Image (cartoon, helix red, strand yellow):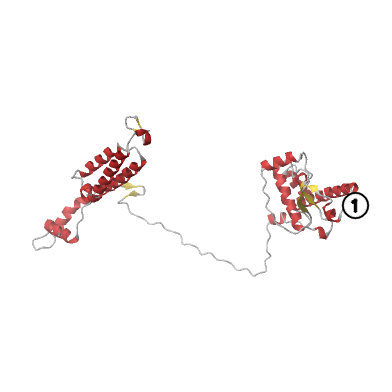
């Protein structure tokens, strides 16, 4: 249904009961009206003819009979043409009169011309004087009255900057703050210390796993000898107390992978595991990978692998790490 101005709902489409013959007749009327709008453009753009109002009213009467979208499309096309004619009609109503140079000069001589055909400049001045406003008396601005004498400000001459050339014998001074923060070559940075700690934990856990597995298995096959000493990667890298430190552990562990000091793989029975190569032949080939980890996955991994405390110790605070660095 379609609401009207009286807020009553009018049935549309199949509910309207409009026949195909009535629809064809309505489309025929719309197309005839569209043809009239295109052909009688001059009459519609003339505001005094009244043709525009008749066409608009006729289109509105046809709209009251529309019940299907096909006829509504024709109404929209007619409405667009009517709006175009209306805009051109407005342009003609507000059109500014134009004058050419010859017509202007002829009118000017007729108005202020002398007997000999020349211009009477005094008469012209009186005629156009009303177009210019004289300055009223007692007018003042922020800088003072208009009739005040202007005294230019005296500006001091600009001194040229003289650059003294150095004889090259002066010693270059080093700022005190740079001296104070100069790095000690024997002192490790925070990242280097964390990488060393991650490597030490891996070495310790890998050796414990190696001794345990070799004690349980008398003879280890040659194909599995390099896999002995593997550690669960989730238990090793994850910190259940801090998502940030978990990301830092993965970042520090990536340096060990790049150096060939550690390896990682996905075991069929254990999932992701890390290990420390025993010989140079066990070094994994260098590869690159992108790891995506968010807080939701981190929480689910800790729950699935029952990680209550990670192998890598929890770093209490940043201040404590800075204090330990200063003590070295």
Q: Quadrant of residue 124?
A: bottom left
In the current view of this chain or complex, which residue is farthest to the bottom? Answer: 167
The residue lying toward the viewer, choosing from 76 and 164, is: 76
The residue lying toward the viewer, choosing from 81 and 237, is: 81
Q: Residue at label 1?
A: 219
Q: Quadrant of residue 312?
A: top right
- Direction from residue 196 to residue 25 in the image, left or right: left
Question: Is residue 155 visible in this depiction of the protein?
Answer: yes
Residue 247, percent from left and from top: 70, 47
Q: Quadrant of residue 307?
A: top right
Residue 16, percent from left and from top: 35, 34
Q: Residue at x 90, y 52 (%)?
A: 219
Question: Is residue 136 visible in this depiction of the protein?
Answer: no
Q: Quadrant of the N terminus?
A: top left
Q: Secondary structure at mark 1?
A: loop
Q: Residue at x 73, y 38 (%)?
A: 303
Label 1 crowd bin: few (<14), some (14–19), many (20+), radius 10 Å: few
């Amino acid at each position: 249904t379609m609401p009207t101005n009286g807020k009553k709902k009018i049935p549309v489409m199949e509910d309207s009961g409009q026949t195909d013959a009535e629809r064809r007749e309505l489309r025929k009327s719309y197309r005839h009206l569209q043809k009239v709008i295109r052909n009688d453009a001059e009459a519609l753009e003339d505001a005094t003819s009244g043709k525009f109002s008749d066409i608009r009213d006729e289109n509105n009467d046809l709209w009251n009979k529309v019940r299907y979208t096909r006829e509504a499309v024709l109404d929209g096309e007619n409405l667009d043409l009517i709006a175009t004619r209306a805009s051109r009609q407005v342009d003609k109503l507000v059109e500014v009169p134009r004058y050419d140079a010859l017509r202007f000069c002829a009118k000017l001589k007729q108005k202020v011309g002398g007997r000999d055909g020349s211009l009477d400049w005094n008469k012209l001045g009186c005629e156009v004087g009303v177009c210019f406003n004289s300055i009223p008396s007692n007018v003042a601005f922020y800088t003072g009255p208009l009739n005040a004498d202007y005294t230019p400000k005296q500006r001091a001459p600009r001194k040229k900057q003289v650059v003294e050339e150095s004889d090259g014998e002066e010693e270059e001074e080093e700022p005190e703050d740079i001296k104070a923060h100069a790095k000690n070559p024997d002192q490790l940075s925070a990242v280097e210390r964390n990488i060393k700690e991650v490597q030490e934990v891996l070495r310790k856990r890998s050796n414990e796993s190696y001794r345990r597995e070799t004690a349980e298995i008398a003879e280890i096959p040659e194909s599995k000898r390099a896999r002995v000493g593997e550690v669960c990667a989730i238990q090793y890298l994850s910190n259940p107390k801090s998502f940030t430190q978990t990301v830092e552990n993965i970042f520090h562990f990536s340096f060990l992978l790049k150096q060939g000091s550690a390896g990682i793989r996905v075991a069929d029975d254990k999932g992701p595991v890390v290990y420390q190569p025993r010989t140079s032949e066990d070094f994994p080939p260098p590869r690159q990978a992108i790891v995506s980890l968010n807080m939701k996955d981190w929480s689910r991994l800790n729950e699935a692998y029952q990680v209550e405390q990670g192998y890598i110790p929890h770093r209490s605070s940043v201040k404590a790490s800075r204090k330990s660095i200063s003590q070295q």
